[in-house]
Image (tube, helix red, strand yellow):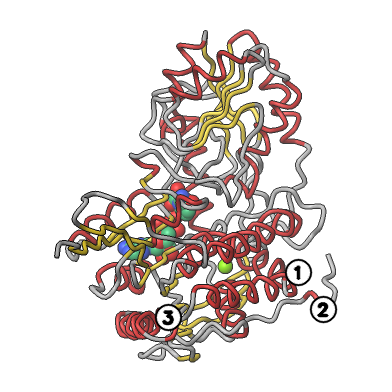
Amino acid sequence: MTVAQAEVPRIPDGRLLIGGRWLDAADGERFVVENPATGKPLAEVCRARDKDVAKAVAAAREAYEGAWGTMDARDRGRILRRLVTLLENHSEELVHLESLDGGKPLKATRRQDLPAVIDCFDYYAGWADKLKGDVVPARSDALTYLLREPVGVVGAIVPWNFPLMNAAWKVAPALACGCTVVLKPAELTPLSALRLGELALEAGLPDGVLNVVPGFGTEAGAALVSNPGVDKISFTGSPAVGRWIMKTAAENVTRVGLELGGKSPNIIFEDADLKRAVAAASSGIFFNAGQVCSAGSRILVQESIKDEVVEALVERSASLAVGDTLDEKTMLGPIISEKQLDKVQAYVAVGQSEGAKLVAGGNRVSRPGYYLEPTVFANVDEHMRIAREEIFGPVAAVMSFKDEQDALRLANSTTYSLAAAIWTKDVTRVHRLAAKLSAGTVWVNTYGHTDTRLPWGGSGGDSGIGRDLGEAALANYTETKTIWVNLRQ
Ligand code: NAI
Ligand code: MG
């Protein structure tokens, strides 16, 4: 687990990026961010509050009305492409920074997060000069056409589970559309966002186009949501905060996009390729230590194969290498914080007291940092809390169903609607279920994929509303304007 010198990330000095300058917080306060793999401090970062956020929003407004808003779309695209090159050149450094700050196994960050970040900026860089309006011949006595305009200043509030990737999902399309951004990274993982800010300046992004204000949710985050100068809040995080944001944004009628939680069903029928289904069910819940909005946290198994699947899942969880994020062999890293580990452990206790059968894991791993063994509950009943609530940790709930109808009813029985998966060889069943599952994404005979080109988001309730990614995300950051030109003489 030695890190080659060249790969040791430069830890950003923790100042706020506002209007192209690196500033201390107005009241001079800082907070400590730690490495969840060891529990040791990693850096001190400036703690933005109202005044800092107000300054950042003003800088974003100025850049929107100035340099960025008046730049040719082609040139905006070129700057974003320069940022892509810089991200590629600094990819390994960013992988280490993200892994240290977020407690994410190096291998996974390298394979998943950074490629997704780079692809996201690359994809939206291409969109910058391809957004267009339309001519709608509504009347013979008028020329009626539509302009597609940026919404203005975007407030992006992102969580700690995929810090840089979640930032990219919002920042890249917003900038491509001609918006400017104030990015509020999670207080647990602010470092990669600050590094992104540095690289964006290096790429030639004009001052104030991307501002980065680390701070706490109830301080910097809340200040951003209530600021009347913000035209759109794009949020990923917990359902409770999402609800609060929607209510608060209503005051100024600020647009909101909410990517919230999940309790995604991974449905395995008896005719499935069980080897592959079990492997995917395991990575579906244990990837990123289960701290994934689309984690396959409910594994629904047809009764006839229940015992076989549970046995195979238990076997697989025992084979997962738990360890430090920088160890290349690690498959399951730590949970993000002591507090989050406590929350997950409390759910393990709830599962046991509710009568579910703990068949694997359940204990904290005795080493520094915040590790939980990969945990599997069998005989889970749909009314149990561990079957209904998002745990956001490496805890699988295995439930059984009789037939297709029963599977569908169970799958759709929570307040979430983010994702679902079906394992079967029956092609008609695939399409029947895909149409009826309450989910923004349905995987068939696979689990967990996302791609920049494909829209991503919940279908309401505790999974939220709106879509990140794909062409769909362009609608988040643009508004049409109708122009009516009288042609009568
Ligand atoms: P959170 O929703 O509190 O944090 C997400 C982001 O929102 C952070 O940047 C935070 O600073 C900000 N925030 C918090 N309160 C805010 C407010 N009043 N106004 C504006 N911004 C605010 O999530 P937290 O507490 O870190 O995690 C708690 C639970 O949320 C997890 O256990 C999990 O169930 C869920 N979660 C879901 C995520 C997803 O990807 N859908 C990501 C992170 C958490
Ligand atoms: Mg951290």
Asked if residue 175 is positioned above or below residue 161 in the image, the reply reads below
Answer yes or no: is residue 342 visible.
no
The amino acid type, in three-letter code, at marker 2 is Ala
Toward which corner of the image does residue 83 lie, by quadrant? bottom right
x and y percent of residue 220 in the render?
A: 36, 74
Query: Could you give the CA–CA distance between mark 3 and mark 2, rounded to whole angstroms?
Result: 30 Å
Residue designated by label 3: 47
Labels 1, 3: front one: 1
Q: Residue shown at 45%/29% (left/top)?
A: 387
Quarter of the picture containing the N terminus is: bottom right
Q: Residues within 10 Å of mark 2 (few under 14, many from 20)?
A: few
Q: Are marks 1 and 2 in contact (CB under 8 Å)?
A: yes
**Where on the picture, by quarter, is residue 99?**
bottom right
The kind of residue tagged 1 is Glu
User: Which residue occupies the foreground of this view, 489 or 386?
Assistant: 489
User: Where's the C terminus, which quadrant?
Assistant: bottom left
Which numbered disc, 3 or 2, marks the residue closer to the eye?
Answer: 2
* Mark 1 Cα-neighbour bin, 10 Å: few <14, some 14–19, many ≥20: some
Left/right of residue 467 with respect to residue 228 in the rendered view: right
User: Residue 160, image x and y in percent?
Assistant: 52, 61
Q: Nearer the viewer, residue 221 or 35?
A: 221
Badge 2 is on which residue? 6
Task: Measure the C-alpha gap from mark 1 to mark 3.
Answer: 27 Å
420 relative position to 99: left or right: left
| Residues at marks 1 and 2, CA–CA distance in whole angstroms | 9 Å
Within 10 angstroms of label 3, few (less than 14), some, or many (20 or more) residues? many
User: Which dot marks residue 333?
Assistant: none
**Marks 1 and 3, the one that precedes in the sequence:** 3
Instruction: Name the element at disc 1.
Output: helix
| Residue 311 visible in image | yes
Q: According to the image, label 1 marks what residue? A: 92
